[in-house]
Image: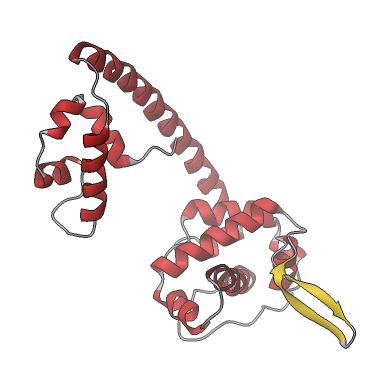
Protein backbone atom coordinates (compact mmCIF):
# COMPACT_ATOMS: atom_id res chain seq x y z
CA UNK A 1 0.00 0.00 0.00
CA UNK A 2 3.05 2.31 -0.02
CA UNK A 3 2.58 3.75 -3.50
CA UNK A 4 4.08 7.23 -3.98
CA UNK A 5 1.28 9.83 -3.94
CA UNK A 6 2.75 11.78 -6.87
CA UNK A 7 3.02 8.58 -8.89
CA UNK A 8 -0.59 7.81 -8.05
CA UNK A 9 -1.56 11.20 -9.50
CA UNK A 10 0.13 10.11 -12.73
CA UNK A 11 -1.71 6.79 -12.79
CA UNK A 12 -5.09 8.33 -11.95
CA UNK A 13 -4.75 10.96 -14.69
CA UNK A 14 -5.10 8.46 -17.52
CA UNK A 15 -2.42 10.29 -19.55
CA UNK A 16 -0.12 8.29 -21.82
CA UNK A 17 3.67 8.64 -21.80
CA UNK A 18 3.47 10.79 -24.95
CA UNK A 19 0.99 13.15 -23.24
CA UNK A 20 3.08 13.34 -20.07
CA UNK A 21 6.15 14.26 -22.13
CA UNK A 22 4.28 17.24 -23.56
CA UNK A 23 3.81 18.84 -20.12
CA UNK A 24 6.26 21.66 -19.37
CA UNK A 25 8.05 21.86 -15.99
CA UNK A 26 5.42 24.03 -14.26
CA UNK A 27 2.52 21.97 -15.60
CA UNK A 28 4.17 18.73 -14.47
CA UNK A 29 4.93 20.20 -11.03
CA UNK A 30 1.29 21.16 -10.46
CA UNK A 31 0.16 17.87 -11.97
CA UNK A 32 2.26 15.93 -9.44
CA UNK A 33 0.72 17.97 -6.61
CA UNK A 34 3.90 19.78 -5.54
CA UNK A 35 2.46 23.31 -5.70
CA UNK A 36 4.56 26.43 -6.23
CA UNK A 37 7.44 25.89 -3.79
CA UNK A 38 10.89 25.01 -5.11
CA UNK A 39 11.43 22.30 -2.46
CA UNK A 40 10.42 19.49 -4.83
CA UNK A 41 11.98 20.83 -8.06
CA UNK A 42 14.58 18.03 -8.05
CA UNK A 43 11.84 15.38 -7.85
CA UNK A 44 9.94 17.04 -10.72
CA UNK A 45 13.12 16.97 -12.84
CA UNK A 46 13.58 13.27 -12.02
CA UNK A 47 10.00 12.53 -13.12
CA UNK A 48 10.47 14.49 -16.34
CA UNK A 49 13.66 12.53 -17.13
CA UNK A 50 11.89 9.27 -16.27
CA UNK A 51 9.07 10.03 -18.72
CA UNK A 52 11.57 10.89 -21.44
CA UNK A 53 13.37 7.56 -20.97
CA UNK A 54 10.19 5.45 -20.99
CA UNK A 55 9.49 3.34 -24.04
CA UNK A 56 6.08 4.52 -25.19
CA UNK A 57 3.36 1.98 -25.99
CA UNK A 58 0.86 2.46 -28.76
CA UNK A 59 -2.10 4.62 -27.71
CA UNK A 60 -4.38 1.57 -27.67
CA UNK A 61 -1.97 -0.47 -25.50
CA UNK A 62 -1.35 2.47 -23.19
CA UNK A 63 -5.08 3.05 -22.63
CA UNK A 64 -5.55 -0.64 -21.80
CA UNK A 65 -2.64 -0.64 -19.29
CA UNK A 66 -3.95 2.56 -17.70
CA UNK A 67 -7.38 0.96 -17.31
CA UNK A 68 -5.81 -1.98 -15.46
CA UNK A 69 -3.77 0.33 -13.23
CA UNK A 70 -6.82 2.40 -12.35
CA UNK A 71 -8.60 -0.79 -11.35
CA UNK A 72 -5.66 -1.67 -9.07
CA UNK A 73 -5.78 1.81 -7.53
CA UNK A 74 -9.47 1.36 -6.70
CA UNK A 75 -8.58 -1.83 -4.84
CA UNK A 76 -5.75 0.03 -3.07
CA UNK A 77 -8.15 2.82 -2.03
CA UNK A 78 -10.58 0.24 -0.66
CA UNK A 79 -7.82 -1.44 1.36
CA UNK A 80 -6.68 1.92 2.73
CA UNK A 81 -10.19 2.84 3.85
CA UNK A 82 -10.55 -0.50 5.64
CA UNK A 83 -7.12 -0.08 7.20
CA UNK A 84 -8.03 3.43 8.41
CA UNK A 85 -11.12 2.01 10.15
CA UNK A 86 -9.03 -0.59 11.98
CA UNK A 87 -6.46 2.04 12.95
CA UNK A 88 -9.23 4.22 14.42
CA UNK A 89 -10.44 1.27 16.50
CA UNK A 90 -6.90 0.66 17.76
CA UNK A 91 -6.46 4.33 18.71
CA UNK A 92 -9.89 4.42 20.40
CA UNK A 93 -8.93 1.45 22.53
CA UNK A 94 -5.53 2.99 23.33
CA UNK A 95 -7.31 6.04 24.74
CA UNK A 96 -8.78 3.79 27.44
CA UNK A 97 -5.24 2.87 28.58
CA UNK A 98 -2.29 4.87 29.92
CA UNK A 99 -1.52 5.71 26.28
CA UNK A 100 -4.02 8.56 26.65
CA UNK A 101 -1.29 10.44 28.54
CA UNK A 102 1.06 10.38 25.51
CA UNK A 103 -1.44 10.74 22.65
CA UNK A 104 -1.22 14.23 21.18
CA UNK A 105 1.59 15.29 23.54
CA UNK A 106 4.69 15.26 21.34
CA UNK A 107 4.97 16.36 17.70
CA UNK A 108 6.07 13.35 15.68
CA UNK A 109 4.44 10.75 17.93
CA UNK A 110 1.24 10.01 16.04
CA UNK A 111 -1.85 8.61 17.75
CA UNK A 112 -1.26 5.29 16.01
CA UNK A 113 2.42 5.21 17.04
CA UNK A 114 1.41 5.83 20.66
CA UNK A 115 -1.13 3.01 20.41
CA UNK A 116 1.46 0.63 18.93
CA UNK A 117 3.94 1.56 21.67
CA UNK A 118 1.53 0.79 24.52
CA UNK A 119 0.40 -2.41 22.75
CA UNK A 120 3.99 -3.68 22.76
CA UNK A 121 4.79 -2.40 26.28
CA UNK A 122 1.61 -3.61 27.97
CA UNK A 123 0.67 -2.53 31.49
CA UNK A 124 3.02 0.31 32.48
CA UNK A 125 2.62 -0.63 36.14
CA UNK A 126 4.68 -3.75 35.45
CA UNK A 127 7.82 -1.63 34.98
CA UNK A 128 9.89 0.06 37.68
CA UNK A 129 11.85 2.16 35.19
CA UNK A 130 11.97 3.17 31.53
CA UNK A 131 15.21 1.22 31.21
CA UNK A 132 13.26 -2.02 31.50
CA UNK A 133 11.21 -1.08 28.45
CA UNK A 134 14.34 -0.05 26.56
CA UNK A 135 15.94 -3.37 27.42
CA UNK A 136 12.80 -5.20 26.31
CA UNK A 137 13.18 -3.52 22.91
CA UNK A 138 16.77 -4.74 22.62
CA UNK A 139 18.10 -1.20 22.29
CA UNK A 140 20.51 -1.34 25.23
CA UNK A 141 24.22 -1.28 24.23
CA UNK A 142 26.08 -4.57 24.29
CA UNK A 143 28.69 -5.28 27.01
CA UNK A 144 32.26 -5.72 25.77
CA UNK A 145 34.72 -7.82 27.75
CA UNK A 146 38.38 -6.89 27.77
CA UNK A 147 41.46 -7.57 29.87
CA UNK A 148 40.93 -4.34 31.77
CA UNK A 149 37.28 -5.02 32.55
CA UNK A 150 33.85 -4.43 31.05
CA UNK A 151 32.51 -1.61 28.92
CA UNK A 152 29.55 -0.82 26.71
CA UNK A 153 29.93 -1.40 22.99
CA UNK A 154 28.65 0.82 20.21
CA UNK A 155 26.12 -1.75 19.02
CA UNK A 156 22.69 -2.48 20.45
CA UNK A 157 21.86 -5.94 21.74
CA UNK A 158 18.80 -6.59 19.47
CA UNK A 159 17.88 -9.36 21.94
CA UNK A 160 14.34 -8.20 22.50
CA UNK A 161 10.96 -7.37 20.98
CA UNK A 162 11.68 -6.47 17.35
CA UNK A 163 8.32 -4.72 16.87
CA UNK A 164 8.82 -2.51 19.94
CA UNK A 165 12.35 -1.74 18.74
CA UNK A 166 11.01 -0.70 15.34
CA UNK A 167 8.25 1.43 16.88
CA UNK A 168 10.72 3.28 19.12
CA UNK A 169 13.20 3.80 16.29
CA UNK A 170 10.52 5.14 13.94
CA UNK A 171 9.10 7.45 16.62
CA UNK A 172 12.60 8.74 17.40
CA UNK A 173 13.23 9.56 13.75
CA UNK A 174 9.85 11.30 13.51
CA UNK A 175 10.32 13.47 16.63
CA UNK A 176 13.78 14.53 15.44
CA UNK A 177 12.13 15.88 12.28
CA UNK A 178 8.97 17.34 13.85
CA UNK A 179 9.69 18.33 17.46
CA UNK A 180 12.26 21.14 18.08
CA UNK A 181 13.01 19.77 21.58
CA UNK A 182 14.28 16.49 20.12
CA UNK A 183 15.85 18.16 17.09
CA UNK A 184 18.06 20.20 19.44
CA UNK A 185 18.90 17.08 21.46
CA UNK A 186 19.88 15.24 18.25
CA UNK A 187 22.23 18.06 17.22
CA UNK A 188 23.80 18.16 20.68
CA UNK A 189 24.95 14.55 20.27
CA UNK A 190 27.75 15.82 18.06
CA UNK A 191 29.87 13.61 15.81
CA UNK A 192 28.25 10.25 16.54
CA UNK A 193 26.80 8.36 13.58
CA UNK A 194 23.22 9.09 12.50
CA UNK A 195 22.05 5.65 13.65
CA UNK A 196 23.67 6.05 17.07
CA UNK A 197 22.04 9.45 17.54
CA UNK A 198 18.60 8.11 16.57
CA UNK A 199 19.00 5.23 19.04
CA UNK A 200 20.02 7.67 21.80
CA UNK A 201 17.03 9.85 20.93
CA UNK A 202 14.82 6.75 21.13
CA UNK A 203 16.18 6.17 24.64
CA UNK A 204 15.38 9.74 25.69
CA UNK A 205 11.92 9.58 24.10
CA UNK A 206 11.21 6.28 25.84
CA UNK A 207 12.12 7.79 29.24
CA UNK A 208 9.80 10.73 28.60
CA UNK A 209 6.89 8.56 27.42
CA UNK A 210 7.33 6.34 30.47
CA UNK A 211 7.27 9.34 32.80
CA UNK A 212 4.20 10.87 31.17
CA UNK A 213 2.25 7.64 31.56
CA UNK A 214 3.58 6.77 35.01
CA UNK A 215 3.05 10.20 36.55
CA UNK A 216 0.06 11.17 34.37
CA UNK A 217 1.67 14.51 33.45
CA UNK A 218 2.05 16.65 30.34
CA UNK A 219 5.21 16.89 28.27
CA UNK A 220 7.38 19.80 29.46
CA UNK A 221 10.02 20.90 26.94
CA UNK A 222 11.89 23.01 29.49
CA UNK A 223 13.38 20.10 31.39
CA UNK A 224 14.12 16.43 30.97
CA UNK A 225 11.93 14.24 33.17
CA UNK A 226 13.70 11.57 35.19
CA UNK A 227 12.37 8.03 35.34
CA UNK A 228 9.21 7.94 37.39
CA UNK A 229 9.14 5.93 40.57
CA UNK A 230 6.85 2.95 40.83
CA UNK A 231 3.50 4.05 42.23
Q: Is residue 151 left or right of residue 205?
A: right
Q: Residue furthest bottom?
A: 148
Query: Residue at point 16% right, 58% down?
Result: 37
Q: Is residue 28 above or below residue 170?
A: above
| Residue 13, placed above or below residue 163 | above
Q: Residue at x 26, y 35 (%)?
A: 53
Extreme residue toward the right, this view: 147
Number of callouts: 0
- Nearer to the camera, 165 or 69: 69
The location of residue 127, given as percent across then percent down, is 75, 67
Closer to the camera in the image, 110 or 68: 68
Q: Position of residue 216 (x, y in %)?
A: 58, 71
Quarter of the picture holding the C terminus: bottom right
Quadrant including the N terminus:
top left
On the image, the x and y values in percent for residue 74 come to 35, 23
One can see residue 38 in this view: yes
Residue visible at 30% across and 34% down in the picture: 8
Amino acid sequence: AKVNVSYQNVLRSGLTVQELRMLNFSELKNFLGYGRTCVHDKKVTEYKERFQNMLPLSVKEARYEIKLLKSDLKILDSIRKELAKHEERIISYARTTRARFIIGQIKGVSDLAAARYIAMVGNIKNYKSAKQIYSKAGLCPTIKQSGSGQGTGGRISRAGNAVLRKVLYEMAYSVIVNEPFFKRYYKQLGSKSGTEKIIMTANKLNRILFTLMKNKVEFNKKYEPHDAELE
